[in-house]
Structures are given as C-alpha cells and as structure tokens.
Amino acid sequence: MISETHRTMGSVEYQPLLDSNTKVSSLSADAIEDFLEHKPIEARWWLKLVAWESRLLWLLSGSSIIVSIFNYMLSFVTLMFTGHLGSLELAGASIASVGIQGLAYGIMLGMASAVQTVCGQAYGAAKHAAMGIILQRAIILHIGAAVLLTFLYWFSGPFLKAIGQSDSIAAQAQIFARGLIIQLYAFAVTCPMQRFLQAQNIVNPLAYMSVGVFVLHVLLSWLVVYVFDHGLLGAALTLSFSWCILALLNGLYIVLSPRCNQTWNGFTLKAFKGIWPYFKLTLASAIMLCLEIWYNQGLVLISGLLSNPTISLDTISICMNYLNWDMQFMLGLSAAASVRVSNELGAAHPRVAKFSVFVVNGTSVAISIVFCVIVLIFRVGLSKLFTTDSEVIEDVSNLTPLLAMSVFLNGIQPILSGVAIGSGWQAIVAYVNLFCYYVIGLTVGCVLGFKTYLGVAGIWWGMILGVFIQTVTLIILTARTNWDNEVEKAVIRIKRSAEDDTLEQLVADA
C-alpha cells in the first residue's frame, strides 16, 4: 500500500506517498490521519481524499437529510392543509407554528445537540456503555422542559395577544397550539433518540421510519381535514398522532435492534447521577440554537404587527416555510458534519476532522446554488401550493429574490453550526448568535420594516444581514481553530458528561 520511495522527516524516515494502485476509499481514518500529518501532499492525492471524505459524508448525510426533511414535512403538510381552510386559519396555524411550536422546537433541538456532541465523541472514543446513560439523561431533561412548555401551549392565546397579535389570529392559533401538546412530548423523546442513533451512524432505519410516518400523515391529514371536516384542531391532533408513532418506532428500534446492544443496556438510575455537568452543556446548546431558530420565528411574529397583518403573515410564512424546507436539507448535512467531526475528535484524528469541515462546506455551497436557481425559476408556483389569494401570491413572488439570497447563506451557516456542535463550541456560538441576530439583524429589520416602505421585505433584509455577519464570524472561528486542542477537550468533555467521576469507572460499572 505504501510506496517504496522514502522521505526523511528530520531524524525520522517516513513513507508518505501512496502508490498508484492504492484505493483511498479502502483506507481507515487512522491511515488518512497519518497521511494528512506529513506535508506537503501532492495535488493528485487531494481529489482522492475528497472522494474518501465525501463517501463517508454522504453515507451519513443522505439518510440524515431524508430524516430531517420528512420530519419537517409533517408540519409543512399540516400547514398546507390548513391553508386551504382559509387565510385566517393559515395565519393562526402559522403564528402557532412559529411563535409557540417554534419556541419549543428551538429548546428541544438545542438541548438535543448536546447528545450529538457527547454521544458522537463517546462513540468515536469507543466508550459505548456511556451512550445509553447519556440518552436517558437527555430524555429526562427534555421531558422536564416539555412540562414547563405545556403551559405556554395551553395559554398561547393570551401570550400572542400580549405580544401584539390580533384577537382573531390569536384565537385560531390557540386552537392549533392546544392540539399540539401531545406532539410536544413526542418530540421531546424523539429528538434525543434520533441524535443517539445518528451518533452511531445508524441513519438508514431512521430514514425508513420518517418516510413511512410521513406517508401515513398525509393520508390521515386528508381524511381528517377534507373527508371528516374536523378543521384546525383535527389537523393539529393528526400531527400529534403522527409524531407519537414516530417516537414509538424510534424507541422500539433502540430497545430491540442488535445494532444498539453495546450502547443501550436498559434503564438505569445512573442517568440521574452527574446530571448537572451534562445540564450545563445542554443549556449552552439550547441557548445557541434557540437564539438562531427564534430569530427567524421572531421575524414572522413581527410581520404580524405590520399594517395588513393577515397578508403580511401569509407572505412571510410561506417564504419562511420554503426557507425552513431548505434549512432541513442543510441541517441533515449539518448533522452528518457534526457526527463526522465529533467522531474524529473522539478518535483523536484532528486533521481528518479539519479536512471534513472543508469538504462538507464545499458540498453545501454547490447544493445551495442549485436551490437558489430553483427558487427563482418557480417563484409563482411555490406560492400557489399554499394559497389561491392573488395578493399573497404576488407578494411572495416579489420576496423570492431575498429568499434565494437566504437559501445561499443557508448553504454555509448551518454547516458551520454543525461543526460547532460536533466540537462542543455551543457557549461561544451562543454569544455570536445573540450579537449578530438580535443586536444587528433584528434592529435593522425592524427599522426597515416599520420606518420605510419596504414592509415585509425590510424585515427579511434584516434577517439576511444578521445571518451574513454570523456566517462570517463562524468562518473566522473555524479557520482559527487548533484541532489538536479540540481533541484534548473532547476527552475531558466525554468524562464530565458521562459521570461526575471518570468515564472509565462508568464503563467498568455498566
């Protein structure tokens, strides 16, 4: 496998070049790490190295993207059905999805990113026994958060009125939100379970389950809304039921599948021991993603305060739904990037982790360019899927150039956030998000939206500016990273997150 041509590195003789018959795809991460360590590397090898990383990335991201998209499409399809009930019902369901459900999603997804960090690094370090305990600890914290959020769901009407929404929209939103309370608990359990499986590179079964539940959900939504005419509440309860089915399938797979034998050893009281150190990482993770997700959701809420709230809400909600659809694709890629980086850091492969960052970002930018073209070509057809209102269709068409710009930025920003999650930088990125989104983006969006003629477009320009500054900041942060130090931090993080004492003791006792 190694060329006979020798090269001297100081006092150590090394053979860095591979011969022409070497199949890079068959090499282990250890071999690639060793190869990347000794520079310079001939240009002819870079393409093969990119192919090696791309293969691993797409084995993970292909199914991860399917999971992310089809999980999101459950809510997406529900909103499509409610949109045909009427403009007021669509506005109410949209405001509930953004202001209430979006708030909960931000917390749950943020907390679940801690599972990606710790389980991914534990799996890379072959500390399998700790992963099941980390999962149980995450579920405990997620259910605790769901209990607190239940009050917000039930009293969503007064909350939305308090932040300036009209009485009619708030009333419809409350009906929809109360129907989603069951879904809140299903989501609280599903989130950490999916991250637990993804950290082990178990993604294909998740994809099959997500697609199957989506098909069932479309059929049930059609029956409930169109055939039995149960309206807004029926649509929400159907969404809750579909998420319960998904949670049940995920749980059964973890308990029954032989692929989880080493990482799931049953329920244990050890999940309650040392929960505080894990909670701190979970809190940082939640703040990081909440600031990011709530920013987009907050702009939708703000649009409801414009002069024509129903039209403004429908317009920005439709565009935001397509932006979120694109984001789900990128979040699937981001999840794969997070697993790749965390696995390699846990396995003490800093150079492979760094190389993975470059490959995934190049891939995502290329995909985003294609998505931008699609958005611009089908600008009218996209809005007609949601509504037949000519005024809304025209406003959506006018907003699509800005939507295309956001789609392009989404090709970079979520991937860098995934790298941050895999590396455990959640606390740092939380400060970055707070400044870029709320100090700059939100301020500029409000000024342009309310003090100029731009309206919804002005609010969207503020979002673009905030995301752009955050993306540039994350690029600088990633470029300046010392990946050898990140390996050392990963070892410490696994130990602290697994138990108060050392991970070795936990594994010995398991």
Image: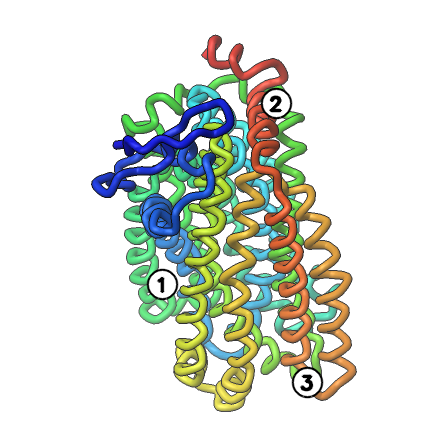
Q: Nearer the viewer, mark 1 or mark 3?
A: 3
Crowding near pointer 2: few (<14 within 10 Å), some, many (20+)? some
Please state the horizontal and vertical placement of residue 240, each as a whole percent of the image: 44, 52
* Type of amino acid at the residue the image marks with label 2: Arg
Q: Residue sitting at 71 percent across and 66 percent down?
A: 441
Tell me how many marks there are. 3
Disc number at residue 496? 2
Residue 263 in view (yes/no):
yes
Please state the horizontal and vertical placement of residue 253, each as a whole percent of the image: 32, 34
* Left or right, 244 with reference to 391: left
**Which quadrant would the N terminus be assigned to in this image?**
top left
Q: Which residue is mark 1?
A: 221
Upstream in sequence: badge 3 or badge 2: 3
Upstream in sequence: badge 1 or badge 3: 1
Image quarter of residue 114: top right
Disc number at residue 452? none
Q: Residue sitting at 62 percent across and 67 percent down?
A: 171
Distance from disc 1 to disc 2, alpha carbons, whole Å, reads: 45 Å
**Which quadrant would the C terminus be assigned to in this image?**
top left
> Is the residue 386 above or below the residue 5 in the image?
below
* Left or right, 123 with reference to 280: left
Q: Residue sitting at 53 percent across and 46 percent down?
A: 419
Disc number at residue 454? 3
Q: Nearer the viewer, residue 71 or 433?
A: 433
Q: Nearer the viewer, residue 284 or 106?
A: 284
Image quarter of residue 24: top left
